[in-house]
Image (cartoon, rainbow, N blue to C red):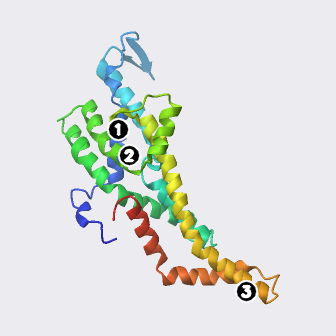
Amino acid sequence: MTGLKPSFISKKRAKPIILTLFLIIFILSATGCAGVDTSGSPMFELGDQVVNGSDPQTVSGGLQLLLLLTVLSLAPALLVVITAFTRIVIVLSFVRNALAVPQVPPNQVLVGLSLFLTLYVMAPTWSRINEEALQPYLNGEISQQEAYEVGIVPVREFLFKQTRERDLALFMHLSNLPRPETRADIPNYVLIPAFIISELKTAFQMGIVIFVPFLIIDMVVASALMSMGMMMLPPSLISLPFKLLLFVMVDGWHLIVRSLVMSFGGG
């Protein structure tokens, strides 16, 4: 992974990047809160207290808190569908199955590695969101709407870069939308599912390539056992040490991680 520049990691970017993402998602979701019409319900009860519902700040603050809790509950799903996590975790699962050791590494290790690789791949995108949208918003330099318009740009650029035009065309057709003139004409509800199925296809393509050398080892071992008349001996029992030896000799984890990072344009 010599192609990645160490400039991605600095003291300024050493803050928890995932928290930055969650804060941006909250900003995006809370964009329309201030415009809620509360004139129809001037008073309401909250426990033993009576709150004046005609106060826009009171109602807006309560709605923002409700939206924050909702977004935090959806944060794991958002982390999976709009980041590099889907491709990474599927490819690593293919590696484990190709080696015929479905419990090694354990699920906790596999998911943990996938999360940190996702943070690594997404670091440039989230750094742009933090510098261009979140920090100016927290400093009061821009409004929520402006933070949304600025912060969504790096995310959409990442999604477009990893999404196939064929998949975009599919969801544009299913949505009965006219042919877009520019990328700005493609809404997020079309872009995100197109990105997901593109990631699934890419992950399965990488998984097939990973399976091929181990499949060859299985075939060679099975043929050797049949030629010796050892029909009752499971070929997988004999081929497992050879597959593990091959994976260790070629430094398999290094190659897999390098290929994953470079597949996102990091090389």
Q: CA distance from mark 1 to mark 3?
A: 56 Å
Query: Which mark identifies residue 33?
Result: none
> Neighbour class for label 2 at 10 Å: few (<14), some, many (≥20)?
some
Report the amino acid beneath label 3.
Ala
> Which residue position is annotated with label 3?
224
> Which residue position is annotated with label 2?
160
Compared with 245, 91 (above or below) is above
Instruction: Determine the secondary structure under disc 3.
Output: helix
Quadrant of image for the N terminus: bottom left
Which percent across, then down, holds residue 16? 32, 54
Mark closest to the chain's N terminus, 2 or 3? 2
Query: Which mark identifies residue 183?
Result: 1
Q: In front here: 244 or 168?
A: 168
Compared with 208, 241 (above or below) is below
Marks 1 and 3 close (CB-CB < 8 Å): no
Mark closest to the chain's N terminus, 1 or 3? 1
